[in-house]
Image (cartoon, rainbow, N blue to C red):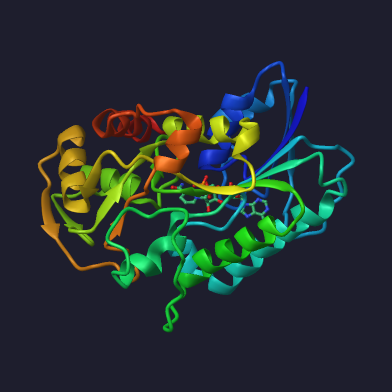
C-alpha cells in the first residue's frame, strides 16, 4: 500500500488529486490549514473514506511525522494575485517555510518521492520582457526583473522552493501548472470572476483583453500529474502542466463565457492588469513525451462544466 501525503488537500487541485488517488492501494494523509481550502460537503465526503486521514495543520509550524511516506504531493501555498498582492512578505514566508518544514520532517529521504507544485509565473518576467515569444519551456533560463512588484513574491518564493527541492536529497518532480480551471476553484480566478460578473451585470469590463492564455481543465491536469508521479523515469526533472492547444485572448474567453451564461451583458475592453503577462502558454512537449496524454478537454466543454458548478453552488 502506498502511503501518500497531500498538502493543500482542501484546495482546488489538492482536492481533485485526492479524489483521484482514493483507491485500495493508497493510504492518503491530507494536510491543510483551511486558510483558503474549503471544509465543504465535497471535502467532508472524501474524509468518510477509511483510507483517508485529515490533519488541520499550519505547515509553517514545525512538523513531526511518525509515518513513512512513499509520495509527498506538496501543494500548500498562498496563491491568487489579490491574496499575494495584499500579503507579499507573508507569501514568501508561508511558501518557503512550509516547503522547508516538509523537507526537514522526513528523515529517510531515499524512500520518499517529493512532487512539488511550482507555477507558470516563473516564466512571467521572460514573457514581459519579450525575451521569449514561444510557449514557455522547462529548459528556458529564467529572468528576474530589476523592478519589484508585490506580485513577484509568489513566483520568487516558488523559484526558491524549486531550488530547495532539487537540493533536498529527495527524488523529486517539479510541476509548473499553467492556468488550471474547473469546478471548486474558488472565486478569485479569471474564469469564476467572469462567470460571476457576466451573470450579474449589464456591462462588464474585461481587463487585459488582448492578453492570451491557454487554459487546462482540472481533470486533464490531474491525469498528467498522476502519470508523471507514478512514472519511475520521470524523476529529478521539471514539467509544465497544462494544455497548449487552445490559446485564447481574454476578450474571446469572455465572449465564450457570455454565450454559456446566456446573458445580454456588454463586454467593454479595459486596462491591463499590472504584472499580467501578455502571453501564457506552455510548451507541453516534454510532459506529453512522458505521459503520452495527447487529448484534452475542449475549452467550451470545460467552461460548461465549470459554469454548472458555479451556477448551482450554494456557498
Ligand atoms: N490553479 C492553478 O492554475 C495553478 C497555477 C500555478 C500553480 N499552481 C500551484 O498549485 C498548487 C495548488 O493550487 P490551487 O489552485 O489548488 O490553490 P488553492 O489555494 O486552492 O490550494 C492551496 C491550499 O494550500 C492551503 N495552505 C496554504 N498555506 C498553508 C499552510 N501554511 N499550511 C497548510 N495549508 C496551507 C490552503 O488552505 C489551500 O487549501 C499551489 O502550490 C499553486 O501555487 C496552481
Horizontal side of 57 relative to 151 (left or right) equals: right
> In terms of depth relative to the viewer, which is nearer, 64 or 188?
64
- The residue lying furthest to the bottom in this view is 146
Where is residue 32? Give x, y as percent. 67, 46
> In terms of depth relative to the viewer, which is nearer, 281 or 155?
281
Residue at point 56%, 42% (across, down): 38
Residue at point 29%, 51% (across, down): 213
Where is residue 200? Give x, y as percent. 23, 46
In the rendered image of this protein, does residue 232 appear above or below residue 148? above
Horizontal side of 210 relative to 16 (left or right) equals: left
Where is residue 144? Give x, y as percent. 46, 75
Number of labelled discs? 0
> In terms of depth relative to the viewer, which is nearer, 74 or 303?
74
Residue at point 39%, 42% (across, down): 284
Q: Quadrant of residue 205?
A: bottom left
- State whether residue 63 appears in this view: no
Work out which quarter of the rendered image holds the N terminus and state it.
Answer: top right
Q: Quadrant of residue 180?
A: top left
- State whether residue 298 appears in this view: yes
Where is residue 151? Give x, y as percent. 45, 70
Residue at point 39%, 47% (across, down): 179
Work out which quarter of the rendered image holds the C terminus and state it.
Answer: top left
- The residue lying furthest to the top in this view is 24
- The residue lying furthest to the right in this view is 66
Amino acid at each position: 500500500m502506498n502511503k501518500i501525503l497531500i498538502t493543500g488537500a482542501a484546495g482546488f487541485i489538492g482536492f481533485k488529486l485526492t479524489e483521484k488517488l482514493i483507491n485500495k492501494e493508497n493510504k492518503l494523509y491530507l494536510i491543510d490549514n483551511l486558510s483558503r481550502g474549503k471544509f465543504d460537503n465535497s471535502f467532508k465526503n472524501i474524509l468518510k473514506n477509511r483510507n483517508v486521514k485529515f490533519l488541520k495543520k499550519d505547515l509553517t509550524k514545525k512538523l513531526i511525522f511518525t509515518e513513512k511516506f512513499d509520495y509527498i504531493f506538496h501543494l500548500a501555498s498562498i496563491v491568487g494575485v489579490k491574496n499575494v498582492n495584499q500579503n507579499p512578505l507573508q507569501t514568501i514566508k508561508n511558501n518557503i517555510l512550509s516547503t522547508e518544514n516538509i523537507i526537514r520532517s522526513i528523515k529517510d529521504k531515499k524512500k520518499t518521492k517529493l512532487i512539488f507544485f511550482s507555477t507558470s509565473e516563473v516564466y512571467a518576467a521572460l514573457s514581459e520582457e519579450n525575451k521569449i515569444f514561444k510557449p514557455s519551456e522547462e529548459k528556458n533560463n529564467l529572468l528576474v526583473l530589476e523592478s519589484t512588484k508585490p506580485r513577484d513574491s509568489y513566483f520568487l518564493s516558488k523559484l526558491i522552493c524549486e531550488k530547495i527541492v532539487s537540493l533536498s536529497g529527495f527524488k523529486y518532480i517539479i510541476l509548473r501548472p499553467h492556468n488550471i480551471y474547473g469546478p471548486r476553484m474558488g472565486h478569485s480566478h479569471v474564469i469564476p470572476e467572469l462567470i460571476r460578473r457576466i451573470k450579474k451585470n449589464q456591462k462588464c469590463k474585461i481587463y487585459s483583453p488582448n492578453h492570451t492564455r491557454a487554459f487546462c481543465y482540472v481533470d486533464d491536469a490531474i491525469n498528467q500529474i498522476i502519470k508523471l508521479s507514478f512514472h519511475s523515469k520521470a524523476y529529478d526533472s521539471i514539467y509544465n502542466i497544462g494544455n497548449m492547444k487552445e490559446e485564447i485572448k481574454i476578450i474571446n474567453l469572455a465572449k465564450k463565457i457570455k454565450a454559456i451564461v446566456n446573458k445580454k451583458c456588454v463586454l467593454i475592453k479595459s486596462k491591463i492588469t499590472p504584472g499580467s503577462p501578455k502571453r501564457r502558454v506552455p510548451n507541453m512537449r516534454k510532459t506529453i513525451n512522458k505521459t503520452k496524454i495527447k487529448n484534452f478537454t475542449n475549452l467550451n466543454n470545460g467552461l460548461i462544466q465549470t459554469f454548472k458548478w458555479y451556477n448551482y453552488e450554494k456557498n
